[in-house]
Image (cartoon, rainbow, N blue to C red):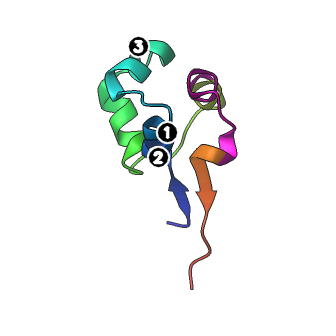
Amino acid sequence: MPIVVNLDVMMAKRKMSLNELSEKVDLTLSNLSILKTGKAKAVRFSTLEAICKALNCQPGDILEYIEES
């Protein structure tokens, strides 16, 4: 899939655990883990907004488009 989720990179930069982020964005560990591993098929803007707010970043810091060859 050409959309790559760099959530784990941003969490590492902010030294935030999955548990801590889960509490801050009010999302289950399971759903957050699916997003973190790139297995999610979609993400709500409200979820993306909450993650960006918790990690103090922009959506482009989390989502990246890589063209397939």
Whichever of callouts 3 and 1 sits on the residue coming sooner in the sequence is: 1
Q: In the figure, 38 relative to 32: above or below?
A: below
The image position of residue 27, as x and y in percent, is 42, 20
The image position of residue 9, as x and y in percent, is 47, 46
Question: Looking at the image, how many numbered discs can be counted on the residues?
Answer: 3
Q: Are marks 1 and 2 in contact (CB under 8 Å)?
A: yes
Q: Is residue 2 left or right of residue 28?
A: right
Residue farthest along the bottom direction in this orientation: 69
Residue labelled with disc 1: 13
Q: Amino acid at mark 2?
A: Val
Residue labelled with disc 3: 23
Q: Which residues are magenta?
A: 50-60
Q: Rounded to the nearest whole Å, what is the CA distance between mark 3 and mark 1? A: 18 Å
Residue labelled with disc 2: 9
Mark whose residue sits in front, 2 or 3: 2
The structure residue drawn at horizontal position 36% and vertical position 48%, both measured from the top left corner, is: 37
Q: Is residue 26 left or right of residue 58?
A: left
Q: Amino acid at mark 1?
A: Lys
Q: Is residue 37 left or right of residue 13?
A: left
Q: Secondary structure at mark 1?
A: helix
Of residue 52 and residue 28, the one placed in the foreground of this image is 52
Q: Amino acid at mark 3?
A: Glu
Q: Secondary structure at mark 2?
A: helix
The structure residue drawn at horizontal position 65% and vertical position 26%, both measured from the top left corner, is: 49
